[in-house]
Image (cartoon, rainbow, N blue to C red):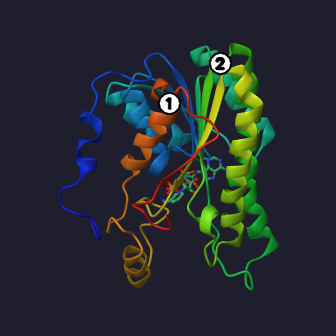
Amino acid sequence: MTGEHPASEADHLESWTTAPLLEDRVAIVTGAARGIGLEIATVFARHGANVLIVDLAEPDAQAAAASIGSAGGVAEGIGADVSNEDDVDRVIQTCQERFGSIDVVVNNAGIIRDATMRKMTLEDFRAVLDVNLTGTWLMTKAAGAVMRAQRSGAIVNMSSISGKVGLVGQTNYSAAKAGIVGLTKASAKELAPHQVRVNAIQPGLILTPMTENMRDDIREAKLKEIPLGRIGRPSEVAAVALFLASPLSSYVTATVTEVTGGRYA
Ligand code: NAP
């Protein structure tokens, strides 16, 4: 794999603790049919969670759930668009019907529509805001209401380092991902009195279907910016999501964790 060191601490991520951290918890992970979301759902299931996989195409969500099931985990898949309020309400209702509660939500679904502002259309600006930011708000609002009532819960929002520094060609994505930081901090303060925690992750360059087709020269240029000198793995984002979702982070809320190999620190 380009840019990866042969031996890495990441090889040992799953062996550092044998205690299941999410035993009998119910977790919703959006955009989890592939990439970082699928890795998070897989790790959560390995740590004892019942997982509802949400993705645009129901067959893809169900296939991902089946792969977790065949590895001994408990997961179901549902098709939904996180930017559609009715879909989000259906996800919340389905989760409660199937699993009885909602303890963790990872707002991971995201899209990019990169172009310089000179060429970007309003449609592409709105589409990226809709899925990344409005989708996160809708899920946080709906799941937050359930969590408030049960007086417990953890929400993890997927921002991006693009939302911290602003990247050329991503006025839409940088705006959405910066918006997620504000949403995370404001909702964390609203929900803290109800014992619900909300935190965000800002990944850097992670090898997923979203990034694997990057031009070689662009990839090499980005690698030079990364102090750890390699591209990150989905499992390295999932490890931080596991921490933020679990009781290990019981006194952590309204934070943003960068998972970037030191890039743009
Ligand atoms: P990915 O491989 O493109 O996966 C994203 C998933 O979200 C896809 O399965 C996609 O479904 C689904 N999705 C898209 N729109 C949706 C919607 N409206 N409702 C429900 N699901 C939807 O992306 P990834 O690289 O794993 O990224 C996951 C998250 O991390 C995103 O929020 C991304 O912005 C963030 N992130 C990624 C990187 C990176 O380097 N990869 C860096 C920083 C932040 P379809 O396949 O059907 O479109």
Query: Few, some or many C-alpha atoms within 10 Å of disc 2 (few <14, some 14-19, many ≥20)?
Result: some
Q: Could you tell whether 235 is left or right of 56 in the image?
A: left
Q: Nearer the viewer, residue 3 or 216?
A: 3
Checking the image for residue 249, the label placed there is 1
Question: Measuring 70% from the left and 43% from the top, which residue is drawn there?
Answer: 185
Question: Does 174 appear above or below 120?
Answer: above
User: Which quadrant is the N terminus positioned in?
Assistant: bottom left
User: Horizontally, is 242 left or right of 90 in the view?
Assistant: left
Q: Quadrant of residue 128?
A: bottom right
User: Residue at 60% of width from left, 43% of height from top?
Assistant: 255
Look at the numbered disc 1 and say if its residue's Cβ is closer than 8 Å to ligand 1: no
Mark 1 → mark 2, Cα distance in angstroms: 24 Å
Whether tag 1 and tag 2 are in contact, CB under 8 A, the answer is no
The amino acid type found where label 2 is placed reads Gln
Mark carried by residue 18: none
Instruction: Work out whether residue 32 or residue 243 is closer to the camera in this orientation and state it.
Output: 243
Q: Residues within 10 Å of mark 1 (few under 14, many from 20)?
A: some
Q: Residue at x 73, y 50 (%)?
A: 182
Q: Position of residue 206 (x, y in %)?
A: 43, 60
Name the quadrant where ligand 1 sits: bottom right
Q: Amino acid at mark 1?
A: Ser
- In the image, taking residue 150 as reference, residue 224 lies left or right, namely left
Callout 1: helix, strand or loop?
helix
Q: Position of residue 174 (x, y in %)?
A: 66, 65
Nearest to viewer (mark 1 / mark 2) = 1
- SS at circle 2: helix
Q: What residue does disc 2 label?
A: 96
